Amino acid sequence: MLLDFAKGHGTRNDFVVFADPDNLLDLSAGQVAFLCDRRGGVGADGILRAVRANQVPEWSGEPDVWFMDYRNADGSIAEMCGNGVRVFLRYLEEEGLVTGERVSVATRAGLRTGRFLPDGRIAVTMGPATRGSDVRLTVGGDSWPATSVDVGNPHAVAELESDAQLAALDLTVAPAWEPATAFPNGVNAEFVVREAPGHIRLRVHERGVGETESCGTGVVAAAAAAGQSDHCTVEVIGGTLEVDLTGPEAVLIGPAVVVARGTCLLPT
Amino acid sequence: MLLDFAKGHGTRNDFVVFADPDNLLDLSAGQVAFLCDRRGGVGADGILRAVRANQVPEWSGEPDVWFMDYRNADGSIAEMCGNGVRVFLRYLEEEGLVTGERVSVATRAGLRTGRFLPDGRIAVTMGPATRGSDVRLTVGGDSWPATSVDVGNPHAVAELESDAQLAALDLTVAPAWEPATAFPNGVNAEFVVREAPGHIRLRVHERGVGETESCGTGVVAAAAAAGQSDHCTVEVIGGTLEVDLTGPEAVLIGPAVVVARGTCLLPT
Protein backbone atom coordinates (compact mmCIF):
# COMPACT_ATOMS: atom_id res chain seq x y z
CA MET A 1 0.00 0.00 0.00
CA LEU A 2 1.33 3.40 -0.99
CA LEU A 3 1.00 6.06 1.70
CA ASP A 4 1.21 9.80 1.06
CA PHE A 5 2.77 11.48 4.06
CA ALA A 6 4.46 14.62 5.30
CA LYS A 7 7.32 14.89 7.78
CA GLY A 8 7.54 17.84 10.12
CA HIS A 9 8.73 18.94 13.53
CA GLY A 10 8.06 21.36 16.38
CA THR A 11 11.21 22.30 18.32
CA ARG A 12 12.78 19.11 16.93
CA ASN A 13 10.05 16.76 18.13
CA ASP A 14 9.29 15.15 14.77
CA PHE A 15 6.37 13.31 13.21
CA VAL A 16 5.16 11.51 10.14
CA VAL A 17 1.71 12.97 9.46
CA PHE A 18 -0.94 11.93 6.96
CA ALA A 19 -4.65 12.26 6.25
CA ASP A 20 -7.06 9.34 6.51
CA PRO A 21 -10.40 11.21 6.49
CA ASP A 22 -12.60 8.11 6.48
CA ASN A 23 -10.67 6.14 9.10
CA LEU A 24 -9.67 3.38 6.69
CA LEU A 25 -6.03 2.96 7.71
CA ASP A 26 -5.84 0.85 10.83
CA LEU A 27 -2.06 0.72 10.92
CA SER A 28 -0.44 -2.20 12.71
CA ALA A 29 2.23 -1.60 15.34
CA GLY A 30 4.73 -2.89 12.78
CA GLN A 31 3.63 -0.34 10.19
CA VAL A 32 3.92 2.50 12.70
CA ALA A 33 7.34 1.23 13.72
CA PHE A 34 8.37 1.16 10.04
CA LEU A 35 7.25 4.76 9.52
CA CYS A 36 9.17 5.88 12.63
CA ASP A 37 12.30 3.79 11.95
CA ARG A 38 14.98 6.41 11.29
CA ARG A 39 17.21 4.10 9.22
CA GLY A 40 14.99 1.40 7.77
CA GLY A 41 11.90 3.60 7.27
CA VAL A 42 10.98 7.28 7.15
CA GLY A 43 11.94 8.25 10.69
CA ALA A 44 10.10 10.16 13.43
CA ASP A 45 9.27 10.26 17.15
CA GLY A 46 5.68 9.28 16.33
CA ILE A 47 2.92 9.40 13.75
CA LEU A 48 -0.09 11.72 13.49
CA ARG A 49 -3.08 10.43 11.52
CA ALA A 50 -5.78 12.95 10.63
CA VAL A 51 -9.25 11.39 10.72
CA ARG A 52 -12.61 13.17 10.50
CA ALA A 53 -13.86 13.13 14.09
CA ASN A 54 -17.30 11.85 13.08
CA GLN A 55 -15.57 8.71 11.75
CA VAL A 56 -13.93 7.94 15.12
CA PRO A 57 -16.07 5.67 17.33
CA GLU A 58 -14.17 6.60 20.50
CA TRP A 59 -14.86 10.34 19.95
CA SER A 60 -18.28 11.56 21.17
CA GLY A 61 -17.60 15.30 21.09
CA GLU A 62 -17.76 17.96 18.38
CA PRO A 63 -18.08 15.99 15.10
CA ASP A 64 -16.96 18.60 12.57
CA VAL A 65 -13.24 18.69 13.44
CA TRP A 66 -10.17 16.59 12.73
CA PHE A 67 -9.21 13.87 15.21
CA MET A 68 -5.49 13.49 15.88
CA ASP A 69 -4.63 9.79 16.14
CA TYR A 70 -1.20 10.03 17.75
CA ARG A 71 0.87 6.85 18.01
CA ASN A 72 4.28 6.41 19.57
CA ALA A 73 7.15 4.95 17.56
CA ASP A 74 6.48 1.49 19.04
CA GLY A 75 2.88 1.61 17.78
CA SER A 76 1.35 2.26 21.21
CA ILE A 77 -1.47 4.79 21.50
CA ALA A 78 -0.71 8.19 23.00
CA GLU A 79 -3.11 10.84 24.25
CA MET A 80 -1.68 14.20 23.35
CA CYS A 81 1.56 15.84 22.38
CA GLY A 82 2.03 19.59 22.72
CA ASN A 83 4.57 19.73 19.90
CA GLY A 84 2.75 17.17 17.78
CA VAL A 85 -0.54 19.06 17.76
CA ARG A 86 1.18 22.12 16.28
CA VAL A 87 2.72 20.02 13.51
CA PHE A 88 -0.71 18.45 12.97
CA LEU A 89 -2.30 21.91 12.62
CA ARG A 90 0.45 23.09 10.25
CA TYR A 91 -0.11 20.04 8.07
CA LEU A 92 -3.90 20.54 7.99
CA GLU A 93 -3.40 24.20 7.09
CA GLU A 94 -0.89 23.51 4.31
CA GLU A 95 -3.02 20.75 2.85
CA GLY A 96 -6.03 23.09 2.80
CA LEU A 97 -7.93 20.80 5.19
CA VAL A 98 -8.70 23.65 7.60
CA THR A 99 -9.21 27.39 7.18
CA GLY A 100 -9.32 30.37 9.50
CA GLU A 101 -7.21 31.61 12.38
CA ARG A 102 -8.71 29.34 15.04
CA VAL A 103 -8.97 25.59 14.56
CA SER A 104 -10.14 23.02 17.09
CA VAL A 105 -8.71 19.51 17.10
CA ALA A 106 -10.07 16.38 18.73
CA THR A 107 -7.48 14.41 20.73
CA ARG A 108 -7.69 11.50 23.14
CA ALA A 109 -7.15 14.08 25.91
CA GLY A 110 -10.17 16.09 24.69
CA LEU A 111 -10.77 19.06 22.42
CA ARG A 112 -7.81 21.39 21.90
CA THR A 113 -7.94 24.77 20.20
CA GLY A 114 -5.15 26.02 17.98
CA ARG A 115 -4.54 29.53 16.75
CA PHE A 116 -2.29 30.50 13.85
CA LEU A 117 -0.43 33.61 15.03
CA PRO A 118 0.57 36.42 12.64
CA ASP A 119 4.26 35.77 13.43
CA GLY A 120 3.99 32.20 12.07
CA ARG A 121 3.87 30.42 15.41
CA ILE A 122 0.94 28.30 16.55
CA ALA A 123 -0.72 28.56 19.97
CA VAL A 124 -2.57 25.53 21.38
CA THR A 125 -4.61 25.06 24.54
CA MET A 126 -3.10 22.38 26.75
CA GLY A 127 -5.70 21.98 29.50
CA PRO A 128 -5.09 23.17 33.03
CA ALA A 129 -1.68 22.84 34.68
CA THR A 130 -2.22 21.96 38.33
CA ARG A 131 0.51 22.33 40.93
CA GLY A 132 0.65 19.54 43.49
CA SER A 133 2.82 18.58 46.43
CA ASP A 134 6.48 19.25 47.07
CA VAL A 135 8.82 16.40 46.20
CA ARG A 136 12.55 15.87 45.68
CA LEU A 137 14.44 14.87 42.54
CA THR A 138 17.84 13.17 42.63
CA VAL A 139 20.35 12.87 39.78
CA GLY A 140 23.61 11.10 40.59
CA GLY A 141 24.78 12.48 43.94
CA ASP A 142 22.75 15.70 43.76
CA SER A 143 19.24 16.29 45.01
CA TRP A 144 16.84 19.26 44.72
CA PRO A 145 13.41 20.23 46.02
CA ALA A 146 10.86 19.94 43.21
CA THR A 147 7.24 20.84 42.53
CA SER A 148 4.84 18.25 41.14
CA VAL A 149 2.63 19.52 38.33
CA ASP A 150 -0.17 17.67 36.57
CA VAL A 151 -0.68 18.58 32.90
CA GLY A 152 -2.77 15.51 32.11
CA ASN A 153 0.42 13.59 32.78
CA PRO A 154 2.69 13.79 35.85
CA HIS A 155 5.70 16.11 36.09
CA ALA A 156 8.23 17.09 38.74
CA VAL A 157 10.10 20.36 38.26
CA ALA A 158 13.35 21.20 40.06
CA GLU A 159 15.07 24.56 39.91
CA LEU A 160 18.84 24.64 39.51
CA GLU A 161 21.17 27.54 40.18
CA SER A 162 23.06 28.04 36.94
CA ASP A 163 23.30 27.13 33.28
CA ALA A 164 26.57 25.36 34.10
CA GLN A 165 24.82 23.19 36.68
CA LEU A 166 22.05 22.45 34.16
CA ALA A 167 24.54 21.57 31.42
CA ALA A 168 26.44 19.23 33.74
CA LEU A 169 23.37 17.09 34.59
CA ASP A 170 23.68 13.47 33.52
CA LEU A 171 20.21 12.59 32.25
CA THR A 172 21.26 9.32 30.61
CA VAL A 173 19.69 7.63 33.64
CA ALA A 174 16.23 8.38 34.98
CA PRO A 175 16.14 10.80 37.93
CA ALA A 176 14.89 9.33 41.22
CA TRP A 177 12.13 10.95 43.31
CA GLU A 178 10.99 11.14 46.92
CA PRO A 179 8.61 10.23 48.37
CA ALA A 180 8.56 7.04 46.33
CA THR A 181 4.74 6.97 46.53
CA ALA A 182 4.38 10.37 44.82
CA PHE A 183 4.35 9.01 41.27
CA PRO A 184 3.13 5.40 41.11
CA ASN A 185 3.24 5.46 37.30
CA GLY A 186 6.55 7.27 37.01
CA VAL A 187 7.15 10.93 36.32
CA ASN A 188 8.56 13.27 33.71
CA ALA A 189 11.40 15.23 35.31
CA GLU A 190 12.15 18.86 34.41
CA PHE A 191 15.22 20.82 35.46
CA VAL A 192 15.06 24.58 35.01
CA VAL A 193 17.25 27.63 35.44
CA ARG A 194 15.77 31.15 35.65
CA GLU A 195 17.49 33.27 33.03
CA ALA A 196 15.44 36.43 33.60
CA PRO A 197 11.93 37.26 34.83
CA GLY A 198 9.55 35.20 32.70
CA HIS A 199 12.40 33.38 30.96
CA ILE A 200 13.65 29.91 31.88
CA ARG A 201 15.95 27.28 30.40
CA LEU A 202 14.91 23.64 30.57
CA ARG A 203 16.14 20.08 30.23
CA VAL A 204 13.62 17.22 30.30
CA HIS A 205 13.79 13.51 31.07
CA GLU A 206 10.61 11.87 29.70
CA ARG A 207 9.52 8.73 31.52
CA GLY A 208 10.06 5.65 29.43
CA VAL A 209 12.00 7.61 26.79
CA GLY A 210 15.00 9.40 28.27
CA GLU A 211 16.21 12.92 27.70
CA THR A 212 14.48 14.61 24.75
CA GLU A 213 15.13 17.88 22.94
CA SER A 214 11.64 19.14 23.71
CA CYS A 215 8.51 18.05 25.61
CA GLY A 216 5.36 20.16 25.27
CA THR A 217 3.72 19.19 28.56
CA GLY A 218 7.08 19.45 30.32
CA VAL A 219 7.45 23.02 29.09
CA VAL A 220 3.99 23.88 30.42
CA ALA A 221 4.74 22.17 33.75
CA ALA A 222 8.03 24.03 34.10
CA ALA A 223 6.41 27.39 33.39
CA ALA A 224 3.62 26.67 35.87
CA ALA A 225 6.08 25.60 38.55
CA ALA A 226 8.22 28.67 37.99
CA GLY A 227 5.03 30.63 38.69
CA GLN A 228 6.82 33.92 38.31
CA SER A 229 4.89 35.40 35.43
CA ASP A 230 1.74 34.97 33.36
CA HIS A 231 3.85 34.55 30.26
CA CYS A 232 6.99 32.46 30.28
CA THR A 233 9.57 31.96 27.56
CA VAL A 234 11.10 28.49 27.77
CA GLU A 235 14.34 27.51 26.04
CA VAL A 236 14.66 23.81 25.34
CA ILE A 237 17.45 22.06 23.45
CA GLY A 238 15.26 21.94 20.32
CA GLY A 239 14.28 25.61 20.30
CA THR A 240 12.18 28.23 22.06
CA LEU A 241 8.59 27.96 23.27
CA GLU A 242 6.27 30.28 25.16
CA VAL A 243 3.61 29.48 27.73
CA ASP A 244 0.60 31.69 28.43
CA LEU A 245 -0.81 30.99 31.90
CA THR A 246 -3.36 33.81 32.04
CA GLY A 247 -6.44 31.69 31.27
CA PRO A 248 -8.03 28.58 32.79
CA GLU A 249 -6.05 26.46 30.36
CA ALA A 250 -2.34 26.77 29.75
CA VAL A 251 -1.51 27.76 26.16
CA LEU A 252 1.68 26.52 24.53
CA ILE A 253 3.03 28.70 21.71
CA GLY A 254 5.76 27.65 19.33
CA PRO A 255 6.97 26.91 15.83
CA ALA A 256 5.88 24.01 13.64
CA VAL A 257 7.14 23.21 10.17
CA VAL A 258 6.52 20.60 7.49
CA VAL A 259 9.91 19.84 5.93
CA ALA A 260 9.13 17.16 3.36
CA ARG A 261 6.26 15.46 1.57
CA GLY A 262 6.49 12.02 0.10
CA THR A 263 5.17 8.60 -0.62
CA CYS A 264 6.25 5.29 0.85
CA LEU A 265 5.30 1.68 0.40
CA LEU A 266 3.87 0.43 3.70
CA PRO A 267 4.85 -3.12 4.66
CA THR A 268 1.87 -5.43 5.06
CA MET B 1 14.46 25.39 -3.98
CA LEU B 2 12.36 22.23 -4.13
CA LEU B 3 14.39 19.02 -4.26
CA ASP B 4 13.01 15.67 -5.40
CA PHE B 5 14.70 12.91 -3.43
CA ALA B 6 14.49 9.29 -2.43
CA LYS B 7 15.46 7.76 0.91
CA GLY B 8 16.88 4.28 1.07
CA HIS B 9 19.18 2.01 3.01
CA GLY B 10 21.51 -0.96 2.70
CA THR B 11 21.75 -3.02 5.92
CA ARG B 12 20.45 0.08 7.75
CA ASN B 13 23.12 2.44 6.45
CA ASP B 14 20.76 5.10 5.07
CA PHE B 15 20.97 7.82 2.46
CA VAL B 16 19.09 10.66 0.81
CA VAL B 17 19.65 10.16 -2.91
CA PHE B 18 18.75 12.37 -5.84
CA ALA B 19 19.60 12.98 -9.47
CA ASP B 20 21.40 16.09 -10.68
CA PRO B 21 22.42 14.99 -14.19
CA ASP B 22 23.91 18.31 -15.26
CA ASN B 23 25.81 19.04 -12.02
CA LEU B 24 23.78 22.13 -11.19
CA LEU B 25 23.22 21.52 -7.46
CA ASP B 26 26.33 22.56 -5.60
CA LEU B 27 24.85 21.92 -2.15
CA SER B 28 26.34 23.82 0.78
CA ALA B 29 27.42 21.97 3.92
CA GLY B 30 24.37 23.45 5.61
CA GLN B 31 22.04 22.04 2.96
CA VAL B 32 23.59 18.57 3.27
CA ALA B 33 23.31 18.81 7.06
CA PHE B 34 19.62 19.74 6.69
CA LEU B 35 18.95 16.75 4.44
CA CYS B 36 20.69 14.43 6.91
CA ASP B 37 19.18 15.98 10.07
CA ARG B 38 16.99 13.19 11.47
CA ARG B 39 14.66 15.54 13.39
CA GLY B 40 14.81 18.92 11.69
CA GLY B 41 15.25 17.62 8.14
CA VAL B 42 14.81 14.38 6.18
CA GLY B 43 17.37 12.24 8.01
CA ALA B 44 20.19 10.01 6.78
CA ASP B 45 23.80 8.97 7.31
CA GLY B 46 24.79 10.82 4.13
CA ILE B 47 23.62 12.00 0.73
CA LEU B 48 24.23 10.48 -2.70
CA ARG B 49 23.97 12.84 -5.67
CA ALA B 50 23.82 11.26 -9.14
CA VAL B 51 25.66 13.37 -11.74
CA ARG B 52 26.51 12.42 -15.30
CA ALA B 53 30.23 11.65 -15.13
CA ASN B 54 31.02 13.81 -18.16
CA GLN B 55 29.73 16.80 -16.19
CA VAL B 56 32.16 16.23 -13.29
CA PRO B 57 35.48 18.13 -13.75
CA GLU B 58 37.33 15.94 -11.21
CA TRP B 59 36.42 12.75 -13.12
CA SER B 60 38.67 11.90 -16.07
CA GLY B 61 37.60 8.29 -16.60
CA GLU B 62 34.75 6.64 -18.47
CA PRO B 63 32.35 9.49 -19.37
CA ASP B 64 29.17 7.55 -20.03
CA VAL B 65 28.36 6.51 -16.45
CA TRP B 66 26.82 8.10 -13.36
CA PHE B 67 29.15 9.72 -10.82
CA MET B 68 28.26 9.16 -7.15
CA ASP B 69 28.83 12.39 -5.23
CA TYR B 70 28.78 11.04 -1.68
CA ARG B 71 28.75 13.53 1.17
CA ASN B 72 28.79 12.82 4.90
CA ALA B 73 26.08 14.24 7.15
CA ASP B 74 28.33 17.16 8.11
CA GLY B 75 28.71 18.11 4.43
CA SER B 76 32.26 16.81 4.10
CA ILE B 77 33.22 14.90 0.95
CA ALA B 78 33.60 11.13 1.17
CA GLU B 79 35.21 8.75 -1.29
CA MET B 80 33.16 5.59 -1.33
CA CYS B 81 30.64 3.70 0.71
CA GLY B 82 30.02 0.00 0.15
CA ASN B 83 26.43 0.19 1.36
CA GLY B 84 25.78 3.57 -0.25
CA VAL B 85 26.79 2.45 -3.72
CA ARG B 86 24.17 -0.32 -3.65
CA VAL B 87 21.47 2.16 -2.63
CA PHE B 88 22.73 4.44 -5.42
CA LEU B 89 22.42 1.62 -7.96
CA ARG B 90 18.96 0.66 -6.71
CA TYR B 91 17.83 4.27 -7.09
CA LEU B 92 19.26 4.57 -10.63
CA GLU B 93 17.54 1.31 -11.58
CA GLU B 94 14.14 2.26 -10.14
CA GLU B 95 14.29 5.71 -11.75
CA GLY B 96 15.07 4.11 -15.11
CA LEU B 97 18.41 5.90 -15.28
CA VAL B 98 20.32 2.68 -15.95
CA THR B 99 19.45 -0.59 -17.62
CA GLY B 100 20.98 -4.03 -17.78
CA GLU B 101 22.42 -6.44 -15.27
CA ARG B 102 25.86 -4.82 -14.99
CA VAL B 103 26.24 -1.09 -14.28
CA SER B 104 29.47 0.80 -13.67
CA VAL B 105 29.53 3.80 -11.35
CA ALA B 106 32.16 6.53 -11.08
CA THR B 107 33.24 7.28 -7.47
CA ARG B 108 36.01 9.36 -5.95
CA ALA B 109 37.74 6.02 -5.25
CA GLY B 110 37.55 5.06 -8.95
CA LEU B 111 35.22 3.07 -11.16
CA ARG B 112 33.08 0.46 -9.40
CA THR B 113 30.98 -2.18 -11.11
CA GLY B 114 27.61 -3.24 -9.80
CA ARG B 115 25.58 -6.29 -10.71
CA PHE B 116 21.89 -6.80 -10.05
CA LEU B 117 21.56 -10.41 -8.89
CA PRO B 118 18.50 -12.56 -9.68
CA ASP B 119 17.77 -12.87 -5.93
CA GLY B 120 17.35 -9.07 -5.60
CA ARG B 121 20.71 -8.35 -3.99
CA ILE B 122 23.34 -6.13 -5.57
CA ALA B 123 27.03 -7.06 -5.91
CA VAL B 124 29.62 -4.27 -6.15
CA THR B 125 33.37 -4.37 -6.70
CA MET B 126 35.20 -2.78 -3.77
CA GLY B 127 38.82 -2.72 -4.98
CA PRO B 128 41.50 -4.98 -3.51
CA ALA B 129 41.56 -5.81 0.21
CA THR B 130 45.20 -5.96 1.31
CA ARG B 131 46.26 -7.60 4.56
CA GLY B 132 49.02 -5.78 6.43
CA SER B 133 50.90 -6.16 9.68
CA ASP B 134 49.79 -7.68 12.96
CA VAL B 135 48.59 -5.20 15.57
CA ARG B 136 46.63 -5.29 18.85
CA LEU B 137 43.25 -3.79 19.67
CA THR B 138 42.20 -2.90 23.21
CA VAL B 139 38.68 -2.25 24.51
CA GLY B 140 38.34 -1.51 28.21
CA GLY B 141 40.56 -3.99 30.03
CA ASP B 142 40.66 -6.55 27.20
CA SER B 143 43.13 -6.79 24.37
CA TRP B 144 43.30 -9.00 21.27
CA PRO B 145 45.74 -9.63 18.43
CA ALA B 146 44.39 -8.06 15.24
CA THR B 147 45.13 -7.97 11.52
CA SER B 148 45.42 -4.69 9.67
CA VAL B 149 43.63 -4.61 6.32
CA ASP B 150 43.59 -1.82 3.75
CA VAL B 151 40.37 -1.49 1.71
CA GLY B 152 41.13 2.02 0.49
CA ASN B 153 40.77 2.99 4.14
CA PRO B 154 42.50 1.46 7.19
CA HIS B 155 40.99 -1.35 9.25
CA ALA B 156 42.09 -3.56 12.15
CA VAL B 157 40.25 -6.83 12.66
CA ALA B 158 40.30 -8.78 15.93
CA GLU B 159 38.81 -12.23 16.40
CA LEU B 160 36.84 -12.90 19.58
CA GLU B 161 35.91 -16.27 21.04
CA SER B 162 32.16 -16.16 21.40
CA ASP B 163 28.97 -14.28 20.58
CA ALA B 164 28.66 -13.50 24.29
CA GLN B 165 32.09 -11.88 24.31
CA LEU B 166 31.16 -9.91 21.17
CA ALA B 167 27.86 -8.77 22.65
CA ALA B 168 29.55 -7.61 25.85
CA LEU B 169 32.01 -5.28 24.06
CA ASP B 170 31.61 -1.63 25.03
CA LEU B 171 32.13 0.24 21.75
CA THR B 172 30.85 3.58 23.08
CA VAL B 173 34.51 4.59 23.27
CA ALA B 174 37.01 4.14 20.46
CA PRO B 175 39.21 1.05 20.73
CA ALA B 176 42.93 1.69 21.23
CA TRP B 177 45.64 0.10 19.08
CA GLU B 178 49.28 -0.92 19.29
CA PRO B 179 51.74 -0.03 17.99
CA ALA B 180 50.53 3.56 18.14
CA THR B 181 52.37 4.30 14.87
CA ALA B 182 50.37 1.69 12.92
CA PHE B 183 47.50 4.02 12.02
CA PRO B 184 48.57 7.68 11.96
CA ASN B 185 45.12 8.73 10.67
CA GLY B 186 43.11 6.47 12.95
CA VAL B 187 41.56 3.13 12.15
CA ASN B 188 38.20 1.43 11.77
CA ALA B 189 38.06 -1.42 14.27
CA GLU B 190 36.24 -4.70 13.55
CA PHE B 191 35.51 -7.44 16.06
CA VAL B 192 34.48 -10.79 14.64
CA VAL B 193 33.36 -14.21 15.83
CA ARG B 194 33.50 -17.27 13.54
CA GLU B 195 30.06 -18.83 13.50
CA ALA B 196 30.84 -21.55 10.96
CA PRO B 197 33.25 -21.99 8.05
CA GLY B 198 32.73 -18.96 5.78
CA HIS B 199 30.34 -17.32 8.22
CA ILE B 200 31.28 -14.59 10.70
CA ARG B 201 29.49 -12.14 12.98
CA LEU B 202 30.79 -8.58 13.21
CA ARG B 203 30.63 -5.39 15.22
CA VAL B 204 32.31 -2.24 13.86
CA HIS B 205 33.61 0.97 15.38
CA GLU B 206 34.04 3.52 12.56
CA ARG B 207 36.73 6.13 13.17
CA GLY B 208 35.24 9.52 13.84
CA VAL B 209 31.71 8.09 14.01
CA GLY B 210 31.41 5.41 16.68
CA GLU B 211 29.71 2.04 16.49
CA THR B 212 27.51 1.65 13.40
CA GLU B 213 25.03 -1.01 12.37
CA SER B 214 26.94 -1.72 9.18
CA CYS B 215 30.14 -0.64 7.40
CA GLY B 216 30.78 -1.90 3.87
CA THR B 217 34.56 -1.65 3.87
CA GLY B 218 34.63 -3.07 7.41
CA VAL B 219 32.73 -6.12 6.24
CA VAL B 220 35.21 -6.64 3.40
CA ALA B 221 38.17 -6.16 5.75
CA ALA B 222 36.73 -8.64 8.26
CA ALA B 223 36.14 -11.26 5.57
CA ALA B 224 39.67 -10.78 4.19
CA ALA B 225 41.21 -11.06 7.66
CA ALA B 226 39.22 -14.18 8.45
CA GLY B 227 40.84 -15.63 5.32
CA GLN B 228 39.10 -18.95 5.79
CA SER B 229 37.08 -19.09 2.60
CA ASP B 230 36.66 -17.47 -0.79
CA HIS B 231 33.09 -16.55 0.07
CA CYS B 232 32.20 -15.20 3.48
CA THR B 233 28.79 -14.44 4.93
CA VAL B 234 28.99 -11.56 7.38
CA GLU B 235 26.28 -10.77 9.93
CA VAL B 236 26.22 -7.16 11.06
CA ILE B 237 23.71 -5.51 13.37
CA GLY B 238 21.88 -4.05 10.36
CA GLY B 239 21.57 -7.30 8.40
CA THR B 240 23.52 -9.86 6.38
CA LEU B 241 26.16 -9.27 3.71
CA GLU B 242 28.37 -11.55 1.65
CA VAL B 243 31.92 -11.02 0.44
CA ASP B 244 33.38 -12.73 -2.62
CA LEU B 245 37.19 -12.81 -2.42
CA THR B 246 37.86 -15.00 -5.46
CA GLY B 247 38.88 -12.19 -7.85
CA PRO B 248 41.49 -9.42 -7.81
CA GLU B 249 38.90 -7.11 -6.30
CA ALA B 250 36.72 -7.92 -3.30
CA VAL B 251 33.03 -7.98 -4.16
CA LEU B 252 30.45 -6.94 -1.54
CA ILE B 253 26.98 -8.42 -1.99
CA GLY B 254 23.91 -7.27 -0.12
CA PRO B 255 20.43 -5.78 -0.07
CA ALA B 256 19.49 -2.21 -0.97
CA VAL B 257 16.03 -0.71 -0.84
CA VAL B 258 14.43 2.64 -1.57
CA VAL B 259 11.76 3.15 1.12
CA ALA B 260 10.33 6.58 0.29
CA ARG B 261 10.26 9.24 -2.39
CA GLY B 262 9.52 12.85 -1.70
CA THR B 263 10.09 16.54 -2.13
CA CYS B 264 11.58 19.00 0.32
CA LEU B 265 12.27 22.70 0.37
CA LEU B 266 16.03 23.16 0.64
CA PRO B 267 17.14 26.02 2.89
CA THR B 268 19.21 28.65 1.07
Image (cartoon, coloured by chain):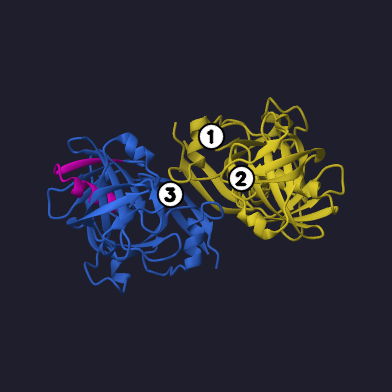
Chain colours: A blue, B yellow
Look at the image and give the residue range highlighted in magenta.
A215-235
In primary-sequence order, the first of circles 2 and 1 is 1
Q: Nearer the viewer, mark 1 or mark 3?
A: 3
Alpha carbons under labels 3 and 2: distance apart: 20 Å
Assign the C terminus of chain A to one quadrant of the image. Answer: bottom right
| Residue labelled with disc 1 | B74
| Residue labelled with disc 2 | B140
What kind of residue is marked 1? Asp
| Residue labelled with disc 3 | A172
Residue A130 in the image, given as x and y percentages of width and height:
17, 57
Residue B98 in the image, given as x and y percentages of width and height:
71, 46
Q: Is residue B81 visible?
A: no
What kind of residue is marked 3? Thr
Q: Is residue A30 above or below residue B64?
A: below
Q: Are marks 1 and 3 on the same chain?
A: no
Q: Residue A210 vs residue A179: left or right?
A: right
Residue A124 in the image, given as x and y percentages of width and height:
23, 51
What kind of residue is marked 2? Gly
Q: Is residue A207 visible?
A: yes
